[in-house]
Amino acid sequence: MSGGRLSDTLVVHGCGAAALLALGAAWFLVGVRPLLNERERATQLADEARVAHEAVQTLVQRRDARREDRERIERELASMTVRLRPATAVNAQLAELTKLAERHRLRVDRIEPGAPQDTPLAVRVPLSLAGRGASPDAVRFLADLRSRFPDIAVDAFEVSAGTGEVDAAIRFDCVWYADRSGERRAVAKEAP
């Protein structure tokens, strides 16, 4: 073989190899690379779907737990027989609270209702009671208040220790739940 033929053969083989390499690269870019990209995207979407599914399962569990809590509370409420007085009886309620405090040797300096707040089930009437007395008497008053007035919730209370012969200062912030239907009947009677 002559040098010219060898170089021609090498050129032909080189061109063939370059063409094969170009075809391989084109095949990779057109056929394999999109397939790999799609596989990667499918894996990413599967991971996102798994995370979303776990989040949905968590939300479903929370919803079910809330539903069970609500049903339990509704059963408890249905079994309770607390009769609410109409909100118009606020003065009678304040008088009874004052008597209860005095029975527990607490001196009432101030007792007053706040602005009523209408809710779907009842009228919430904030009550504030301030006075003086011994700390143990204030604790007994709280226990008796809860048992005798199930329609009153205690939001906060303070007992500031007294010194020597001076009684402790006491303050109770309560909420009285009053009947809404009594208010509606009174309004209905007033309507022409």
Image (spheres, helix red, strand yellow):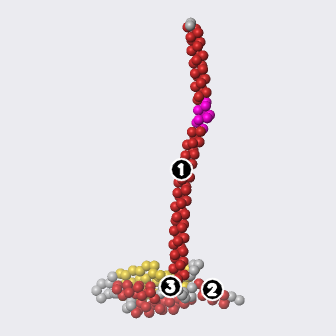
Report the mark closest to the observer, 2 or 1.
1
Pick out the residue farthest to the top: 2
Disc 2 element? helix
Q: Residue 87, can we see it?
A: no
Q: Position of residue 169 (x, y in %)?
A: 37, 84
Q: Which mark is residue 184?
A: 2
Q: Is residue 189 above or below residue 2?
A: below
Disc 1 element? helix
Magenta stretch containing residue 59, yes or no? no
**CB of mark 2 within 8 Å of CB of mark 1?**
no
Relative to residue 67, is residue 163 drawn left or right? left
Q: Which residue is mark 3?
A: 151
Q: Which residue is mark 1?
A: 47
Give the residues in magenta: 26-34
Estimate how packed mark 3 is, as few (under 14), some (14 to 19) or many (20 or more) residues with alpha carbons within 10 Å. Answer: some
Instruction: Please tell me which residue is depicted at 53% across the width and 58% down the height of the picture.
Output: 55
Disc 3 element? loop
N-term-proximal mark, 3 vs 2: 3
Q: Position of residue 161 (x, y in %)?
A: 33, 82
Instruction: Please tell me which residue is depicted at 35% across the width and 85% down the height of the picture.
Output: 135
Report the mark closest to the observer, 1 or 3.
1
Estimate how packed mark 2 is, as few (under 14), some (14 to 19) or many (20 or more) residues with alpha carbons within 10 Å. Answer: few
In space, the residues marked 3 and 2 are separated at their CA atoms by: 19 Å
